[in-house]
Image (cartoon, grey):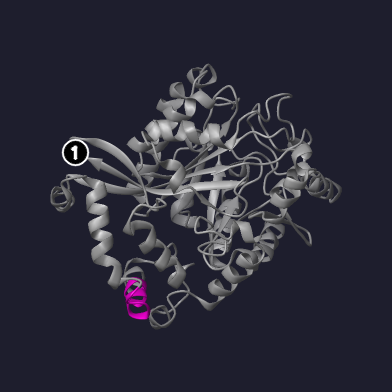
Amino acid sequence: MSDQTLLEVLREPVLAETRANLARSRARLLPQFRTPQQMLGRQGNGCGATIGAMPRCDFACRGCYLGDEANRIPAASVEEVKAQMRALRPLLGNAGNLQLTDGEVTLRPVGEIIELLQYASSLGLVPMLMTHGDSFRRQPGLLERLVREGGLREVSIHVDTTQRGRRGDRWRAARTEAELNPLRDEFAAMLRAAARTTGMPIRGATTMTVTRENLAGVPDVMRWLLRNADVFRLVSFQPIAQVGRTEDGLGGGVTVDELWEGIARGLGSTDLARAHQWLGHPGCNRFVHGVVATHASRGARYLPVRVEGDGDGPRVVDEFLDRFGGVTFRRDGGVRRWLRALALALHGPRATLGNVPAFVRYWLRRLDPGHPWRAASDLLRGRMQLQSLVVVSHHFMSPEELATPTGEERLAHCVFHVHTRGETMSMCEANARGGRTRYYEALRNAERPEHALAP
């Protein structure tokens, strides 16, 4: 929940801290990257992640950014992981994105995971638990406990054909992404059930390692997401880099354009390139924030929120971000959420209420071209449902890529950081320049008792 009182929400719908962080992020961008597509310094400050929270993993995936020594490294203490969170908090800001990750964090004792989730939230961060998901399959009730006791609201489940170690012969034998869609169905059902039984909202995400071998499966995954946008609100495609214990020769070979062509095919979109947004360097992060419109008889369509050159749409979005960039409702409850929306209208009526008629007309025409009033009727009668779906591509670098001038330029614009005992670094530095290895060696030398795998 937000730490602001109701009166404070009315007075300051976007925190001064948030505005200052955005200005700092914007200042480090090279001029050529300060475009309307750029969301760093306009709406967000990037993401942070824990490191050493549980280096070990009970999978043996073909693509893995951890080193060969990871399974022999003791996990960092709860207090040390908390210290990482505190160090990242000024960088991420209020409601900043924190990935609770490393190897497989769900192998820690459940009580410790709950403590870490609660602590991240107490700092004003939004923790997302990153997992392969099999712990939830093996331990019924674990997900619900994390939701109820830990306040878990965001969970990302990694599923793809490069994984090795999944329970069930059917999944071990899968060679195409389409063959894994029933497994994805299982996780979708699990998240729906957890939200229903706990009465708490859960935002699902999924990640997929992309190689030359499974690139053709990207459209299948996107079509699956269109059918399950009620629970999975974000997907991150991550072309493999030759880092860590990744199988020799598996990294590289998938370009940004090839990946997004596959995404567009799965969405049935012809103008997705005009909807691309960046967070930092365009060679590192591209994303599209869109809406899945599911009609009772016409199926699902994906509509990007901001399409360059598309009438009133981008103008309204840009005016809102120029006035209220950084606003977030993610830590708000029901009353506070509505109050913040009211505060936005009061503080910037032109950027909000003044644009409502044009924006409504714009969206009704997009939802049902030629029949905008039919779209309005379908929405009011519940025949059409709208859900948010963010599509992301995140491109890590190999040591060879990091050593180039472009690699250094990308590193200077990094938006994904970890903190290791007094040093904050890019995730690419951690993975491709030995930062992770140095930190793991420090953990090993500390000679802490190793955690037993959770039952």
- 253 with respect to 158 (left or right): right
- 234 with respect to 104 (left or right): left
Horizontal and vertical percent position of residue 240:
64, 33
Per the rendered image, the range of residues in magenta is 340-350
Horizontal and vertical percent position of residue 447:
84, 48
Residue at horizontal 48 percent and vertical 74 percent from the top: 3
Q: Which residue is mark 1?
A: 296
Horizontal and vertical percent position of residue 24:
63, 69
- Indicate the quadrant where residue 125 lies: bottom right
Q: Residues within 10 Å of mark 1 (few under 14, many from 20)?
A: few
Position of the N terminus, as image quadrant, is bottom left
- 268 with respect to 157 (left or right): left
- Indicate the quadrant where residue 249 lies: top right
Residue at horizontal 15 percent and vertical 53 percent from the top: 380
- 271 with respect to 408 (left or right): left
Measured along the vertical axis of the image, is residue 225 above or below residue 166?
Answer: below
Q: Nearer the viewer, residue 278 or 444?
A: 278
Residue at horizontal 37 percent and vertical 54 percent from the top: 200
Q: Nearer the viewer, residue 273 or 181?
A: 273
> What amino acid does circle 1 point to?
Ala
Horizontal and vertical percent position of residue 173:
53, 16
Q: Residue furthest right?
A: 445
Main secondary structure type of the part rendered in magenta: helix
Per the image, is 442 magenta?
Answer: no
Q: Is residue 42 visible?
A: yes
Q: Is residue 89 visible?
A: no
Measured along the vertical axis of the image, is residue 331 above or below residue 213?
Answer: below
Q: What kind of element bears circle 1?
A: loop
